[in-house]
Image (tube, coloured by chain):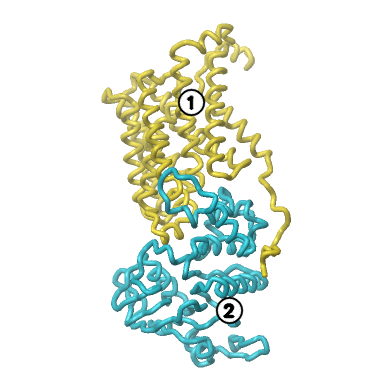
Amino acid sequence: MGVVDLLAGTVEFQPNWWEILQSNFMRTALIAGILVAIASGLIGYFVIVRGSMFASHALAHIGFPGATGAALVGLPVFTGLVAFTIGGALAIGFLGKKANEREIATGTVLAFATALGVLFASLASENTSTVTNILFGNLLAVPPQQLVIFAAFLVVLIAALLVIFRPLLFASIDPAVAEARGVPVKKLGVAFMILLALVVSMAVSVVGVLLIFALLVTPAAAALRFTVRPGWVIFWSSTIGVASVIVGLVISAMINLPPSFFIVSAVFAIWLASMAIKKERPVKQITGGHTSSVH
Amino acid sequence: MLELDNASAVRGSTTIWSEGTFTVPSASIVGVIGPNGSGKTTLLLMILGLLSTGTGSVTVLGREPERGNPRIGYVPQNYASIAGDSVRARDLVLLGLTGSRYGIGRTSAAEHARVDEVLDEVGATEFANRRMSQLSGGQQQRIAIAQAIVGNQELLLLDEPLANLDVRNQQEIVALLKRINEQRGIGILLVVHDLNPLLSVLNGAIYLLDGHPHYDSVDEIVSEDLLTHLYGTQIRVVRTAQGDLFTRNA
């Protein structure tokens, strides 16, 4: 039996995909996905500028035992996820300044958290699809009542970023100078980690713990290939995320498979295309910068 | 611009240096020299108000040091390594003006104009729209200086601004510092390892010797006995038509 036959057995084109897309659960998934993609785009630029890629990856893993633990004791998975990612955010945020030590501590906690997650998952073994959804995401499993929470998180994120945008950017790009200028670099770092935890919790429902990079980092990285203005990077990374979610859900409706793979593939394709774009090149190699204004 | 009265620098339980008593005249260009670990950067952090004075007193621009003093500009060490791929040079300079501001308010036209002016002043207009990572070391240093003076600062602190620059770029940065010192009347304090590239522009130097900071005008600093003591190796001062030069005696 060839691969094609094998695929034909599981993958089947749905002629009524347009109707599926208009169903209630698809609409919930679409709204949830768009909210999450916008939130990810908003925070993604800062994740890259701050070099917090590893922290965002780690937060998702730290959320894993929270989610499986909540399932074990009968709480909503999302509640456990939020509690653990915020706890992890505070811990990472307050960890030492030295990047090396912070990464080792973060990685160690990440490994332990993942192990704990596996333990909780095996204790609650009667529901393996829940674990799969946490690990790989499943937009179609988002309950409608969660949309309100997602929307509230997004509002909190937008409001917070509007207030701290400039000092956070200053502290992210140029911490030593920002500190000297009186910007509370450490407090902003903790605030950023908490906002990141909210977005990570949301993003887990779309792409899962293991694929979190695809929404939190990759769209912003692709956007940064063709623009470097902070506002535009945020706009384009949100747009890339939203487009990928829509494409992923449409394909998912067409062939009746969970959307995670298609969402991540769309992001991946956009990122690959962006890699073909040359960043604006230096016009010529100038050693000093002689211009007419130098007297 | 800087006055120390029996001041000491303490980090944790370690005294870095003590008994500093001197006055640096305003609007001068002053080098901070001393062997590694003698507390040069510590002095900068104290002036910035990031480290409190151990004993005695430090007066900066007529006041006690305070964190976030908008009258002081700062260019930290290894500036190039933190400047990334994700920011334009111009936006970095703008942050020097607006980076401490909370809230939604848009950047005003006057602020953009101010950034344009200072970019022109440091000779960076041509490459201001590039990413920091695409600039050479000398160009990045110009951007860092622009950011540090864009708010009309009265004192500019630079930590090893000439490190990792070739001779030509060193000369250009020194000439730039001299120019902004003359045109703006801004005081400049730079931590350096080698006084040679600066000898033509320095008014004096703070030197950290045997655990105590001292200040002297440049003529007194450039003495073979003092430099030999300071660096712990035989130094020879060579008088040339272009000025003094000191070299290590082989």
Q: Nearer the viewer, residue A74 or B156?
A: B156
Looking at the image, the residue that sits furthest to the right is A284
Q: Which chain is cyan?
A: B
Residue for badge 2: B198
Which residue occupies 39% across, 84% down?
B22
Q: Is residue A128 above or below residue A192?
A: above
Is residue A107 visible to the viewer in this orientation of the structure?
no
Q: Nearer the viewer, residue A213 or B246?
A: B246
Q: Is residue B21 above or below residue A6?
A: below
Q: Position of A4 compared to A110: left or right?
A: right
Disc 2 crowd rating (10 Å Cα; few below 14, some 14-19, many 20+) is many
Q: Which mark is residue A34?
A: 1
Look at label 1 and name its amino acid: Ile
On what subunit does the disc labeled 2 rest? B
Q: Position of B53 compared to B202: left or right?
A: left
Q: Position of A246 compared to A281: left or right?
A: left
Residue A68 place in picture, x, y as percent: 34, 28
Disc 1 crowd rating (10 Å Cα; few below 14, some 14-19, many 20+) is many
Is residue B25 visible to the viewer in this orientation of the structure?
yes
Which residue occupies 51% across, 42% down?
A45
Query: Disc count in the image?
Result: 2
On what subunit does the disc labeled 1 rest? A
C-alpha gap between disc 2 and disc 1: 58 Å
Look at label 2 and name its amino acid: Leu
Which residue occupies 38% across, 19% down?
A143
Q: Is residue A3 above or below residue A188?
A: above
Residue A273, located in which quarter of the rendered image? top right
Residue A54 place in picture, x, y as percent: 46, 44
The answer to whether tags 2 and 1 share a subunit is no
Q: Nearer the viewer, residue B165 or B144?
A: B144
Chain A shade: yellow
As helix, strand or loop, the secondary structure at mark 1 comes to helix
